[in-house]
């Protein structure tokens, strides 16, 4: 008779997950590294990760669900696109691979609920469960490691020998066991070896020695979770990254096999068209932004973060075709957008741009924007 885990596995594959494993709850070894990561302030402004309760929950899955007896860990693949194909798609900027899918916060939880229903049906029990996508409040990469999905690479991603690291992790906490031997007796070996590709290629040098990242410098954090300004010294290093960054995965040898066979991935049409359109008359207002990106992970940065990032990308591109667009952003009602548009306009040493910045300075009231305009003019 197949165990419940052996029965649920093919069902998960039929839903599109490409890796499935099971483990048990218990204190996590990685927790001490997490504590150090917080103590070193590498969580940047993500204060919700550092509170007493946040730490308590991450110490053990039992602190999230006391009745938990087993944890199903699942991986859902997202397009493994190369830097070259990202640029071909959008012309202007690059977008993280997972944003080529619909927003996973919306489509993954219903799939996980289907798995829970399957388990309830097969076991004939009323099973208590909790489902999670994204890292909160679990140390999900260690759970993935314990469940045999892969090892935690130097770039901090969970890496599988056959499927690389272009996948999203999800977990289902259950109050029943899924198999007699729930835990792998042998954890996946570390296959990073002497490789340093991710460390050498990270544009902002934010990969730390203990397989964690310093979010204060990581482009994924700076362009997505970060709600404020992008530090001046990091803006040029962001290059054309409009939303997230996949470089430390794109250069990983364990992803090359999957990149080579990956089907071409396309951004949804309306996102692609929008990203190629630099018409100053088409700057989206709040409602238009919500409508355009409601189905996409890009909506997470909101209008303010989106045009902040767009300004930085255009400032790095230095294409004169974007000047009118940036001038329009300098008149935006949002000071965060004006601040970064001013910085970007400082990349163009044209008389007309200087005059425009000088005029803007006369009416600007926000101290940070004033400072940025002065820097741009100097
Ligand atoms: S996501 Fe980009 S910036 Fe962050 S660690 Fe990886 S390569 Fe560096
Ligand atoms: S690039 Fe090399 S060092 Fe970095 S995660 Fe991949 S195998 Fe490990």
Image (cartoon, rainbow, N blue to C red):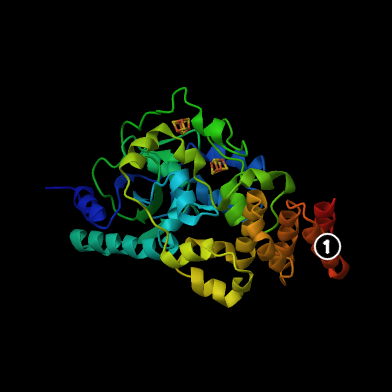
Apparent side of residue 65 relative to residue 280 in the rendered image (left or right): left
The residue at which mark 1 appears reads as: 355
Q: Quadrant of residue 12?
A: bottom left
- Which residue shows up at 72% across the image and 72% down it? 333
Q: Position of residue 226 (x, y in %)?
A: 63, 55
Regarding residue 29, the answer to whether it shows in the image is: yes
Task: Tell me the quarter of the picture where residue 42 sits.
Answer: top right
Residue visible at 55% across and 65% down?
277
Q: Classify mark 1 as within 8 Å of ligand 1 or not, answering yes or no.
A: no
* Nearer to us in this view, 175 or 249: 249
Q: Nearer the viewer, residue 95 or 75?
A: 95
Q: Is residue 188 above or below residue 14?
A: above
The residue sitting at the right extreme is 362
Q: In the figure, 33 relative to 11: above or below? A: above
Q: Is residue 149 above or below residue 371?
A: above
Image x and y of residue 324, in percent: 68, 65
User: In the image, is 303 to the left or to the right of 125?
Assistant: right
Horizontal side, residue 117 vs residue 293: left or right: left
Q: Look at the numbered disc 1 and give the secondary structure of its residue.
A: helix
| Residue 357 point in image, percent of width and height | 81, 62
Could one spot residue 46 in this view of the protein? no
Q: Residue furthest top?
A: 194
Instruction: Please report the residue visible at 66 percent of the width from the left and 65 percent of the height from the top.
Output: 325
């Amino acid at each position: 008779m197949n165990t419940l885990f052996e029965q649920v596995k093919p069902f998960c594959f039929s839903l599109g997950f490409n890796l499935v494993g099971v483990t048990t709850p218990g204190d996590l070894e990685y927790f001490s590294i997490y504590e150090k990561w917080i103590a070193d302030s590498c969580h940047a402004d993500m204060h919700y990760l550092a509170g007493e309760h946040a730490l308590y929950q991450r110490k053990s899955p039992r602190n999230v669900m006391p009745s938990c007896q087993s944890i199903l860990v699942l991986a859902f693949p997202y397009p493994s696109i190369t830097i070259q194909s990202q640029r071909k798609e959008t012309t202007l900027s690059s977008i993280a691979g997972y944003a080529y899918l619909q927003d996973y916060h919306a489509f993954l939880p219903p799939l996980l609920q289907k798995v829970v229903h399957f388990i309830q049906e097969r076991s004939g029990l009323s099973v208590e469960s909790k489902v999670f996508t994204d890292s909160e409040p679990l140390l999900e990469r260690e759970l993935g490691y314990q469940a045999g999905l892969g090892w935690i690479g130097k770039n901090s991603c969970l890496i599988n020998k056959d499927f690389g690291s272009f996948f999203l992790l999800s977990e289902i906490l259950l109050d029943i066991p899924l198999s007699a031997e729930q835990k792998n007796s042998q954890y996946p070996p570390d296959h990073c070896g002497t490789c340093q590709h991710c460390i050498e290629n990270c544009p902002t040098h934010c990969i730390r020695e203990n397989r964690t990242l310093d979010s204060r410098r990581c482009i994924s954090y700076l362009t997505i979770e970060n709600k404020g300004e992008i530090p001046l010294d990091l803006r040029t290093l962001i290059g054309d990254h409009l939303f997230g960054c996949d470089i430390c995965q794109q250069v990983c040898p364990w992803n090359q096999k999957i990149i080579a066979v990956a089907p071409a991935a396309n951004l949804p049409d309306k996102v692609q068209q929008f990203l190629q359109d630099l018409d100053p008359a088409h700057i989206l207002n709040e409602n238009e932004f919500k409508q355009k990106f409601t189905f996409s992970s890009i909506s997470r940065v909101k209008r303010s973060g989106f045009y902040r990032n767009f300004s930085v990308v255009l400032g790095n591109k230095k294409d004169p075709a974007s000047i009118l667009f940036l001038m329009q952003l300098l008149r935006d009602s949002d000071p965060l957008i004006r601040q970064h548009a001013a910085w970007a306009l400082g990349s163009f040493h044209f008389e007309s741009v200087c005059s425009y910045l000088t005029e803007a300075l006369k009416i600007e009231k926000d101290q940070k924007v004033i400072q940025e305009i002065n820097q741009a003019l100097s």
